[in-house]
Amino acid sequence: MTHSRLTSSDDAVIGTYDAVLPNVVSRAGSRLALPPSVFAVAAKNPFAPATRTHPIYFDYPRSEEDEVNVTLPDSSTVSVLTPPSNLKVGALGYTNTTTQNGNVVTFRRSMMVDAMLVEARYYSAVRNFYNAMVAADQKPLLLVPKAQ
């Protein structure tokens, strides 16, 4: 394995992993529920309080890109793909898509914060954005047994 050092703060950091995630699937009758956003499924809205007095400070502008490929067992198929999400509130953006090619389901997620300081008067919009993003991240894929 070769390690390289970042040469500037503009360089992207990319990690590719193969993972086995035990107990990530839950059963709902004959269906299985699988959260495709494995990196953000347990995330909570950092702006849960209903009101805010002070401006919102983000450490730095940033973007996150996640791609999760799930290989389904031969005995299962997706009942319905989750619809795409496209959220945009000022300097905040989020999209996700779920596609299927054969027995591989691909979930792509993109989140962007292009601000460092947001005035408190915009708190409600920021809070609503994060609520919608968390809800989109937690929509599960529903897997059903293939018809024999």
Image: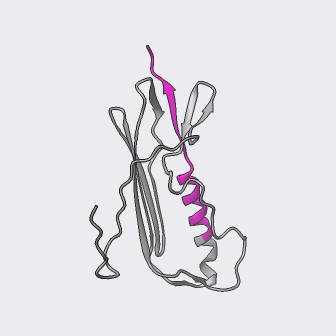
In the figure, is residue 39 to the left or right of 47? Answer: left
Q: x, y percentage for residue 56?
A: 60, 81
Name the residue at 40% across, 25% down.
74
* In the rendered image, the vertical position of residue 122 relative to residue 25, given as above or below: below
The picture quadrant where one finds residue 31 is top right
Residue nearest the viewer, comparing 58 with 124: 58
**Residue 131 at x, y = what percent?**
61, 61
Q: Is residue 95 above or below residue 29?
A: below
Q: Quadrant of the C terminus?
A: top left
Task: Looking at this view, name the residue that lies furthest to the front.
Answer: 1
Q: Is residue 21 left or right of residue 47?
A: left
Indicate whether residue 142 is drawn in magenta: yes
The boundaries of the magenta stretch are 127-148
Residue 71: quadrant of the picture? top left
Residue at point 28%, 61% (across, down): 1
Q: Locate residue 72: give its quadrant.
A: top left
User: Residue 98: where, in percent of width, then height?
Assistant: 41, 45
Q: Residue 107 appears at what percent x and percent y?
A: 41, 48
Which residue is at the far top? 148
